[in-house]
Image (cartoon, rainbow, N blue to C red):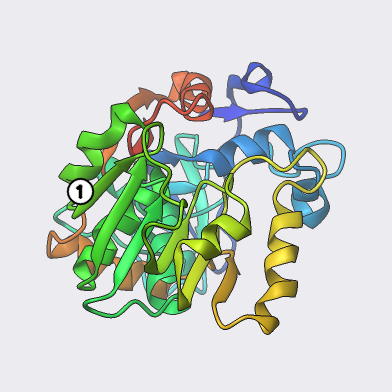
Amino acid sequence: MKAIIQDIYGTADVLKFADIDEPVPGENQVKIRVRAAGVDMGVWHLMTGEPYLVRAVGYGLRKPSVPIRGRDVAGVVESVGAKVTQFKPGDEVFGTCEGSFAEFAVARQDRIAPKPAELSFEEAAAAPISGVTALQALRDIAGVQAGQSVLVIGAAGGVGSYAVQLAKALGAHVTGVCSTGKVELVRSLGADDVLDYTRTDVTDGSRQFDVIIDTAGNRPLSALRRTLVPRGTVVLVGGEGGGKLFGLMGRILRAGLLNPFVAQRLRPFVSTEGQQHLQALSKFLADGSVRPAIDRTFALAEAAEAIRYIHAGKARGKVVVTV
């Protein structure tokens, strides 16, 4: 089968479009004929091995332990392992796995769910990681309630584009922050207010919000706290920067150390993957209150270019590789 593989860590130049053996599902796994695979900054981090903490948590110290890139997946079940009871060949599914930039991939049965019939494979592939992350940040960590004010920093990004829509679906008044060229996208997602960060400093203290979802990671905690009501919640969702060794871990550690001593809730957050989260997200996708915002699609052979596009910050919403 064709796949995007790498033997060493590095830029997108290390990726190769090659023929490799098809994967064989384990007893609790499903083999998927991949139709589409989402692209996000997580793919870039696993490709480069940066921050180096990525290597230490199981992805390979000297070279990638999983040579095939890609994690978001949508496709059709090809075969199932001996202990798989929830899926059968022919089922359309979406979820997460290791190595979705390929014609076939294997996924644990508890990491996939039935694909919402209302979504194309491309739309479904854009949803698992970013959509679930946004849902958990808003619902489980921040506990967003109807009538609250929510600020989404990085509202045009993968997680941000879902956070705007999900916050609206939960009944919040949503303000999105993005760059000039992405204002119309964020407005089309349903944001009540859209702020261009090149023209307006949202953290100048003139506005305060019940909840802040920060997907950018480039504002100090002091600025975020100034923008939060006295007992509000800020959820730190990823972001870039912070150096090659630990990335944003310093900022996350500071938030954790400060949190017990302030009335505001400062919550670093890493999402968890599982079928129940996909099923919860599917309800919003199926009723149309949330739709994946796809900027561009790339063919499988062009996956390296898709990653470059994401890393350059050009994407408005999600980017998808089609197979």
Q: Is residue 151 visible?
A: yes
Residue 177 position, x and y percent, is 36, 45
Q: Nearer the viewer, residue 313 or 49?
A: 313
Q: Quadrant of the C terminus?
A: top left
Count of all numbered marks drawn on residues in the image: 1
Q: Quadrant of residue 80?
A: bottom left
At 20% from the left and 68% from the top, the residue drawn is 169
At 16% from the left and 43% from the top, the residue drawn is 188
Residue 65 position, x and y percent, is 76, 44
Q: Is residue 296 visible?
A: no
Q: Nearer the viewer, residue 84 or 15?
A: 15
Question: As displayed, is residue 213 above or below residue 122?
Answer: below
Residue extending furthest toward the front: 206
Dot 1: within a 10 Å radius of its alpha carbon, few (fewer than 14), some, or many (20 or more) residues? many
Residue bearing mark 1? 189
Q: Quadrant of residue 17?
A: top right
At 43% from the left and 25% from the top, the residue drawn is 300
Left or right of 265: which side holds 302? left
Residue 31 position, x and y percent, is 47, 52
Q: Secondary structure at mark 1?
A: loop
Left or right of 101: which side holds 68? right
Amino acid of disc 1: Leu
Q: Nearer the viewer, residue 297 or 202?
A: 202
At 41% from the left and 25% from the top, the residue drawn is 314
Left or right of 246: which side holds 4? left
